[in-house]
Structures are given as C-alpha cells and as structure tokens.
Image (tube, rainbow, N blue to C red):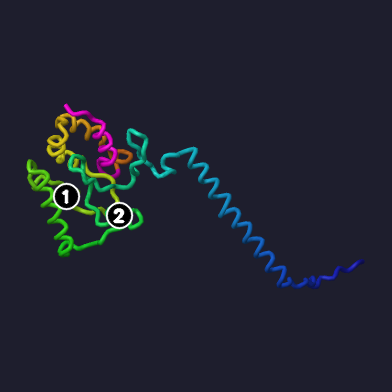
Amino acid sequence: MQIVNSGAIEQKPVSKGSYIFSVIRLSLVFVVLCGIIYPLASTALAQVLMPSQANGSLLKNGEGQVIGSELIGQNFKNPALFQGRVSSIEYKAEASGSNNYGPSNPDLLERTSNTIAEWKANNPDVPVSELPIDLVTNSGSGLDPHISPAAATVQIPRISNLTGISADKLEALVAKYTEGRDLGVFGEERVNVLKLNLALMETPAN
C-alpha cells in the first residue's frame, strides 16, 4: 500500500517585484475602466437618452443664441421683465450657497429693506403687503431659477405699463408657464423666470 505524505506543501515565497507588478497592473485596469471607459459610456448614454440635460439644460432666444440655463437663475435688470429671487451671490454657479443670516442679522435687514424700497419705487400700484416672501428672500443655493406663481402675478401691473401688453395676456402667460408639483405631490407650483421672460419678449403689445 502506497502511503501519501500528508505534510504541508511547501510554497515558494512571492517576490517583492512580483507583488509590485500585480498592484500596478490592477491599478492600470481600474484607471482604464473607471477613468476612461465608464465616463465615455455614461456620457454617450446621456447624450442619447437626455441630450438637453446632459448639455446643461441650456435655453436659446429666437435667434438661436444661448442665453442661460433653465436650472440657474439670472439677475434681470430690465424692469419690463419678470424679476427672480434675491441672490446674495449674484447667481454665480461657482459660488453656490447662502450667507445663512439669522433674522436679526443687520446685513440681512439692510438687504431686505433695500429690496422692499426698490419694489415700492418700481411697483407703485402694488402695496408691500401683497409682496410674496420669495421676492425678498434668498434661496438656499442662491441659484433658484423659479418663483411662485403669486410672485409672477404681482409683477404684472408693472410689466403691463412698461410693455403695453394687457394684464389678461400676461396672466395667461404666467398660467402657461406655471409648473405643477413633482409627481403631483412633491414641492410647490413654480414658474421658471427665464422661460417666462423668453415668452414675454416674443409676445406682441396690444
């Protein structure tokens, strides 16, 4: 009868050079997979399935010129256009955020007072008591492109006087560009100010 040796099989030690080579090879594999193949594949897939969102959700005017993104608000200086929310960062995307001022902060009180004073000067037909809160407050990101339907509607008298477009036509425009709650449940109704202003600029006076 042949007896099999049950002792442990002797293994040759792995050389340091072989170990380093394995680490380098594995690193190169992950660099190619995660740094080249995956980004290219996800970019190509996004361009096919959602090209507008993948390219920044850009909006163009009637001449085909890019004038902004529907995801980032703008400061509209022209009083004949709808105005968005206050932005303490001037809507600079690279500086997203807010100052997180408390309600008693003097800088916040001064900014709010200036905003209300500007409203009174530009909207003499609408009392401050009817001014929606989102027109005098900063959003958490400082980039919010939306206002409430009420904040858009309250600006109609000013815009009608400056453009000659009837209030009824402007009200219909606001209603057309009012977006509902997400999935009918989440969030609030809102109006994208840039989209609304693009439509406004294409609306003829009466």
- Reading the image, the residue beneath label 2 is 141
Identity of the amino acid at label 2?
Ser
| Left or right: 96 as drawn, with respect to 48 | left
Question: Where 25 falls versus 194 (above or below)?
Answer: below
| Circles 2, 1 touching at the beta carbon (< 8 Å) | no
170 magenta-colored: no
Q: Earlier in the sequence, mark 2 or mark 1?
A: 1
Q: Is residue 27 above or below residue 91?
A: below
Task: Tell me the number on the disc at residue 133.
Answer: 1
Q: Name the residue: 36% across, 38% down.
A: 65
Q: Is residue 98 left or right of residue 42?
A: left
Q: Residue furthest right?
A: 1
User: Which of the image's four quarters has the C terminus?
Assistant: top left
| Marker count (numbered) | 2
Q: Residue at x 32, y 41 (%)?
A: 182
Q: Assess disc 1: are there few (<14), some (14-19) or many (≥20) residues with their C-alpha within 10 Å of its C-alpha.
A: some
Q: Amino acid at mark 1?
A: Ile
How dense is the environment of label 2, judged by Cα within 10 Å: few (below 14), some, or many (20 and up)?
A: some
Of 92 and 42, the residue lying toward us: 92
The spot of residue 195 in percent (x, y) is: 29, 38
Residue 143 numbered mark, or none: none
Tell me the magenta residue range: 186-206
